[in-house]
Amino acid sequence: MMTGFVCLQLMNQLFIVGNQIAESAGFAIESLKANKVRTFLSTLGVTIGIFCIIMVLSLVDSLQTKLQDSVDSLGKDVVFVEKWPWEFGPDYKWWKYMNRPNTNLSELKKISELTTLGSAAALTIDLPTFTVERGKYSAQGVRGIAVSYQYSSIRELNFEYGRYFTENEASNGDAVVVIGYTMYDNLFPGGEWPLDRELKISGRSFRIVGVVKKEGESMINNSMDNIFLIPVKAANSYIRLNSNSTNSRIHIKASEGVNINMLEDELKGLMRSIRKLRPMEEANFAVNKTTMLSEPLNQLFSVVNTAGWIIGGFAMLVGGFGIANIMFVSVKERTQQIGIQKSLGAKNYFILIEFLVESIVLCLVGGSIGLLFVYGTTQLATYLFEMELILSFANIVLGMIVSVAIGIVSGFIPAWTASRLDPVEAIRAK
């Protein structure tokens, strides 16, 4: 019985406080309407601060998502064995790495036979840039990649037309080619049927067996749109693949449930054995994984985020002082009203909440305007520069939370001052 009474009292208090907050919000909105210029000037700092912070966060989130998607397209569960390590910084020993031997089909075969943690392995060789021709049509500046058969098991390829190479085509070195969608657009402008048509690559004819669906831009130049794929053995017949002008790598996909670091350690041991390196001899190969690219990027984005908070923080600091100043003015203008309210029985917390809510509403107005500017900027950037920027729901919520926090911090002292006024002295004030 006693517990029920306490709950009833608590609910009644919550109802009173909720009703008071609603009334205070109404008073605040009326006050804002009555003093439009003052409201605009006092919320300007908050607007700029929220715009700076949320705009930077949205920009970083969009770039980070796009970059991460591009990096992930290489394969989150794939390890790469090649001569060039994926490192950054001024101490990159390119002259030493350049003289390392390229990975080759023989090493691919041995890795495929010996690995216990990998489910698929493929060799890829970056070819020089070509002009690809079909009759009077041509596609210039096209990148080529020579690939072994299991490449499609490692890099997901979605086909608009046709298929990937068969195992026989790859092992025989048949002159077949898979092309990207941009190449298809350039070489078949009328939307003609591309399969089994002939292309000229470096003066040699190749038969089209597949067209990969459009993938769009990649921030690490990994999109298939303007790339063609040919079997390694087909490329080997007319290009010197082991020269320093080409770069090859072996891709090894981890088996289901295998940790990528375990696969990395296994491959280091296998490659030392395959290349007959002594225990203390320096490795003449590199073992790379996508986290080596994403971790430095995450650090960079973290610095940019911090810079955004610092820039926005200064603007919000100015805005916070502006809100506090306006609230002190508001308290002074309504001193007699406060005295009347308190003489009629209004509690201190009632006055405190009234002015605190007004401060919060001021900041929410400024924050909402800032978020509208962010949304408009993202839409404009997407339209003008074809750069997809997204104002996420999480950033909208963050903007609102920051606005409320500024309102509470800026308005607390003026609200506390108003709540502690003596009713008699307040009524007498002029």
Image (tube, helix red, strand yellow):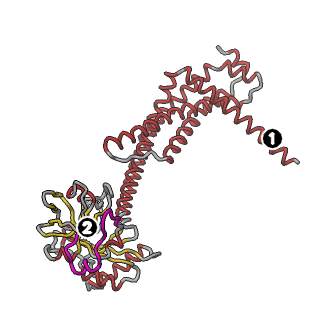
Viewed as shown, does residue 107 lie left or right of 114?
A: left
Identify the residue at horizontal 21%, vertical 78% (top origin): 173
Which quadrant of the view contains residue 417? top right
Seen in the picture, residue 368 relative to 70 is either above or below; the reply is: above
Image coords of residue 300 (percent x, y)? 37, 54
On whether residue 165 falls in the magenta region, the answer is yes
- 135, 250: nearer the viewer: 135
Identify the residue at horizontal 59%, vertical 36% (top origin): 408
Label 1 neighbour load within 10 Å: few <14, some 14-19, many 20+: few
**Which residue is the site of mark 2?**
178
Residues at marks 2 and 1, CA–CA distance in whole angstroms: 75 Å
Q: Which mark is residue 238?
A: none
Q: Do tag 2 and tag 1 residues touch (Cβ < 8 Å)?
A: no
On whether residue 293 falls in the magenta region, the answer is no
Dot 2 or dot 1, earlier in sequence: 1
The C terminus sits in image quarter: top right
> Which amino acid type is shown beneath numbered disc 2?
Val
Q: Is residue 101 visible?
A: no
Number of numbered markers: 2
- Magenta span of residues: 157-178
- 316, 149: nearer the viewer: 149
> Which amino acid type is shown beneath numbered disc 1?
Gln
Q: Which mark is residue 9?
A: 1
Image coords of residue 160 (percent x, y)? 32, 62
Image coords of residue 380 (percent x, y)? 36, 39
Identify the residue at horizontal 18%, vertical 67% (top origin): 198
Image coords of residue 148 (percent x, y)? 27, 76
Query: Which circle, 2 or 1, is nearer the viewer?
Result: 2
* Disc 2 secondary structure class: strand
Label 2 neighbour load within 10 Å: few <14, some 14-19, many 20+: many
* Disc 1 secondary structure class: helix
